[in-house]
Image (tube, rainbow, N blue to C red):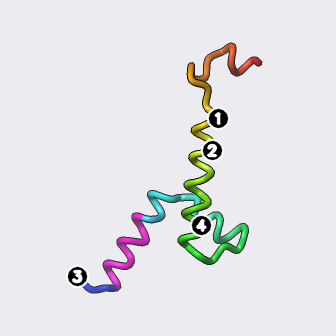
Amino acid sequence: MTSINRDLKKRRWDELLYPGTQVLKNLYGIRDEFLAKKVIRAAALTARKNIPSTGFGKATISE
């Protein structure tokens, strides 16, 4: 396998694992891929913290 094919495969996996990376690059002009992934991880962790321990039920949504 050539290094070009390896790089393409890695890029495809990165896009699957971190789909927001491309959005951050395009919308906000973040060109550093490492920084974009770091921002996405932080956003995902924050979102997980905000999920109620009981999950989302009808009462939770109506409140």
Q: Which residue is mark 1?
A: 50
Secondary structure, mark 1, is: loop
At horizontal 57% and vertical 23% (from top left) the residue drawn is 53
Whether tag 3 and tag 2 are in contact, CB under 8 A, the answer is no
Q: Which residue is mark 3?
A: 1
Per the model, the C-alpha gap separating discs 3 and 4 is 28 Å
State the SS at label 3: loop
**Upstream in sequence: badge 1 or badge 3:** 3
Badge 2 density bin: few <14, some 14–19, many ≥20, Cα 10 Å = few
Instruction: Point out the stretch of residues depicted in magenta.
Output: 4-13
Element under disc 4: helix
- Indicate which label's residue lies in the foreground, 3 or 4: 4
* Quadrant housing residue 25: bottom right
The quadrant in which the C terminus is found is: top right
Q: Quadrant of residue 21?
A: bottom right
Question: Does residue 41 show up magenta in the picture?
Answer: no
Q: Secondary structure at mark 2?
A: helix
Q: Kindly identify the amino acid type of the residue bearing the numbered disc 1.
A: Asn
Corner quadrant of residue 41: bottom right
Q: Which residue is mark 4?
A: 36
Going by the numbered disc 4, the residue's amino acid type is: Ala
Q: Characterize the local packing of mark 4: few (<14), some (14-19) or many (20 or more) Cα atoms within 10 angstroms.
A: many
Residue type at the position of mark 3: Met
